[in-house]
Image: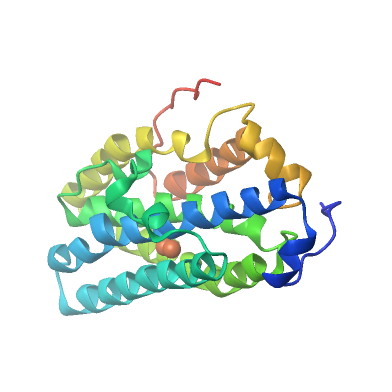
Amino acid sequence: MANAYHEVKSVSDLANEPAEYREAIAKIVVSHTVNELYGAQVFDEPAIALAPTPYAKWLSCRIAMEEYHHHVRFKGLADELGIAPAATDPSAKRPLSIFGFPLKTWAEFCVIKMLADLAEILQVEDLLHCSFVPLRNIGRMTMPEEKFHAAFGKDFCSELCKTEEGRREVQKAIDDYAPYLPKFFGAAGSKNNEMYRKYGLKERTNEAMRDDFLARARAVVEALGLRLPELEAVPA
Ligand SMILES: [Fe+2]
Ligand SMILES: [Fe+2]
């Protein structure tokens, strides 16, 4: 679906846009800057210690490096936009629900990469076509890495599922983690989302993105011969 809003090519061109457009950009950039850092701190870096083999550790290091790099990219844009450093400091902000999960096992990390990074892929999909070109460019650099993270999660889950015990562990991690996911897409009927769509910064409503995610997540989980639990709807 093409965006109706015109392209805004650079940070300096923002001076010609309405204040509401600049606010919308700032909110999206702050959200990605904080969440990429928070995710790297609570999941990706600790996962290096949980990884069971040198090979798994190496790939976990790569993922942690890439997630910190995603933060650095978004933070660079936040700085160019003149956003105050405190606004992108995760210690000063309430973390998103998906990061509230207390990671303890390797299987949980693999499930988080398989499902939460798929959720991130959907968010980045909308950035790829958004009206603000600097954000679109970050989306294009980030997407192949998010796809690698989700594929890593799926491959390691599939490896674990080769034993009965591993299969049970992965299913339990899915059952425990999946309830954290629906909120990641925000409330139904969100005013911010309406503003993002008006300015061509997002294509889909929160509800549409969540439904699309749940269908894709279910397909991934069922391909492993496992099940995604029924999840409660998110209140408006
Ligand atoms: Fe990321
Ligand atoms: Fe990722």
The percent coordinates of residue 69 (x first, y second) are 40, 74
Residue 230 is drawn in which quadrant? top left
The quarter of the rendered structure image containing the C terminus is top right
Q: Is residue 162 left or right of residue 190?
A: left
Between residue 101 and residue 211, name the one nearer to us.
101
Q: Is residue 229 left or right of residue 132?
A: left
The percent coordinates of residue 50 (x first, y second) are 14, 62
The percent coordinates of residue 181 (x first, y second) are 42, 39
Residue in the picture at 75% in, 68% down: 13
Q: Is residue 233 left or right of residue 112?
A: right
Residue in the picture at 51% in, 64% down: 78
Mark count: 0
When the figure is inspected, residue 110 is found, relative to residue 51, above or below; the finding is above
Residue in the picture at 53% in, 64% down: 82
Between residue 205 and residue 176, name the one nearer to us.
205
Let me know if residue 203 appears in the view.
no
The percent coordinates of residue 23 (x first, y second) are 63, 49
Residue 227 is drawn in which quadrant? top left
In this picture the colour scheme is rainbow
Ligand 2 placement by image quarter: bottom left
